[in-house]
Image: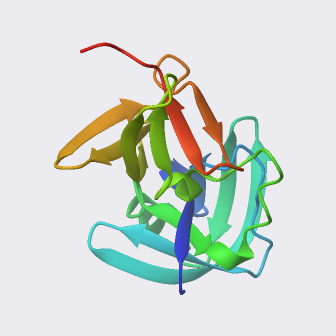
Amino acid sequence: MQQPVAIAVVRRPLGVKGDLLLEDYTDGAYAPAGGQEVVLLGPGAEMATVVRSWERRGAEVVAHLDCAEDRNAAEGYRGWRVAVDRDDLPPAGDDAYYAFELVGLAVETTAGEAAGQVEAVYSVGPHDVLTIRDGERTYEVPFVRAHVAAVIPGRKVVVVPYREA
């Protein structure tokens, strides 16, 4: 897989047949088809497997992957991320974006001042966090309305509220 992008994380096994309960990072915007290859990304490991089923249930997904033939096998994937090739994802839309597309964007304040560049995006559960580098300084910003005023995909800019030091 050339450019793996995490689309979900395994929360826990479900039942005895190897089903996995996943937290869906795409909010239902993308679901791999049965028979599609995905990659599981774990601590220091990467493993290709095939999707047998992928069913959205509310805010979560119940999936069955070839690598998890029973509950014991499924238990070993707790916390692993499910990834697909970036090229497999549909376009995000005009004013929409995927979180990974924020990496590399310029950051500016609501007053129009340069405030760095997005270096990374990661999830802490209830929300994502942006890692921003501004020269020698690196800081983290919760990706919530109080700390990120706007994302303007057309301008390739993330806008943060202006605060006097």
- Residue sitting at x 82%, y 53%: 93
Q: Measured from the top left, where is residue 117 in percent x and y? A: 39, 50
Left or right: residue 39 compared with residue 89: left
Q: Measured from the top left, where is residue 30 in percent x and y? A: 76, 58
Q: Residue furthest top?
A: 164
Q: On the image, which quarter does residue 123 sit in? A: top left
Left or right: residue 59 compared with residue 156: right
Q: Nearer the viewer, residue 73 or 82?
A: 82
Q: Is residue 102 visible?
A: yes
Q: Nearer the viewer, residue 114 or 151?
A: 114
Count the marks: 0
- Residue sitting at x 53%, y 79%: 3
Q: Measured from the top left, where is residue 107 in percent x and y? A: 45, 41
- Residue sitting at x 50%, y 30%: 112
Q: Nearer the viewer, residue 127 or 108?
A: 108
**Vertical placement of residue 63 versus 140, above or below:** below
**Vertical placement of residue 39 versus 153, above or below:** below
Identify the coloring.
rainbow
Q: Measured from the top left, where is residue 44 in percent x and y? A: 26, 73
Q: Quadrant of the N terminus?
A: bottom right
Q: Nearer the viewer, residue 118 or 61?
A: 118
- Residue sitting at x 26%, y 38%: 139
**Vertical placement of residue 54 versus 65, above or below:** above
Q: On the image, which quarter does residue 52 sit in? A: bottom right
Q: Is residue 16 visible?
A: no
Q: Quadrant of the C terminus?
A: top left
Q: Residue furthest left?
A: 136
